[in-house]
Amino acid sequence: MDAIVTPLVSRTAEEAGITTPANAGGHRRPSREEAEAAVRTLILWSGEDPQREGLLDTPRRVVKAWEEFYKGYREDPNEVLDRVFEEVAGYDDIVLVRDIGFYSHCEHHLVPFVGKAHIAYYPRHGVVGLSKFARCVDVFARRMQTQEAMTAQIASAIVEALDPRGLAIMIEAEHMCMAMRGIQKQGVSTTTTKFTGVFKEDPTEQVRFISLVRGIRI
């Protein structure tokens, strides 16, 4: 039997409360030329000469890189998680996707933090394609972020799309704002978690999730 695909009603980014460069705080989005000029100003402020050969084209490259770094502002998680497959042969046990690599940028210093996300859920109405979780992580990671907020945002988007019996998320990351500046400690890992439904109600389910993430048999 073919899988039954249920399209979810997609909302616009504005209706979903998703901030995009065009509507962020109601401010006008600067032009590319203005953005490149701002990069030149920062190069000058750092003590360098933006007109020397090695830096002459840097403003253009930086602006192009920012388009990629922060493309999550132009993406809607509701569209990423827009299909639920209901025909799963009665499967209702845990589904786990682990080691989803990501990079983001700390909203306090605009330096990277890099890590992995682990996501598990108990289906209620159906399942989504496994790659959708990786795409959902990227939607929120490709913004100016805190790890705590990103964890909550991913959880909220998945719960809204799937309405699972329970959802568990763990994010582990190293923050360059700790490694490159301030305290300057390399290799420090930060872990955040979010549990809903049966994972929140039953601590043994949290243990099962963490054990599966760590590859421990219980």
Image (cartoon, rainbow, N blue to C red):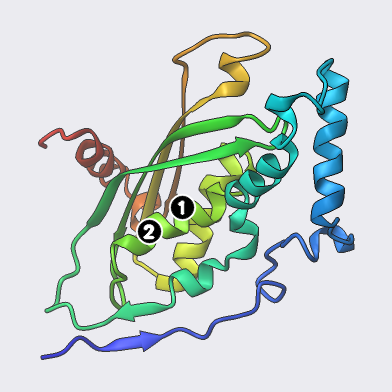
Q: Is residue 25 above or below residue 51?
A: below
**Residue drawn at the location 58% of the way across and 65% of the way down:** 75
**Residue drawn at the location 43% of the way across and 71% of the way down:** 81
Q: In the rendered structure, which amino acid carries the disc numbered 1?
A: Val
**Residue 213: x %, y % from top left:** 25, 39
**Residue drawn at the location 82% of the way across and 47% of the way down:** 35
**Residue 115 picture quarter:** top left
Q: Which residue is mark 1?
A: 137
Q: In the rendered structure, which amino acid carries the disc numbered 2?
A: Phe
| Disc 2 secondary structure class | helix
Say which of 110 and 140 sits in front: 110
Placement of the C terminus among the 4 image quadrants: top left
Check the image and name the residue furthest to the front.
53
Could you tell whether 147 is left or right of 122 in the image? Answer: right
Say if mark 2 contacts mark 1, CB within 8 Å. yes
Q: Which residue is mark 2?
A: 133
**Residue drawn at the location 44% of the way across and 77% of the way down:** 82
Q: Is residue 52 above or below residue 192?
A: above
Could you tell whether 131 is left or right of 145 in the image? Answer: left
Kindly report the distance in space between the C-alpha atoms of the residues bearing marks 2 and 1.
6 Å
| Disc 1 secondary structure class | helix
**Residue 113 picture quarter:** top right
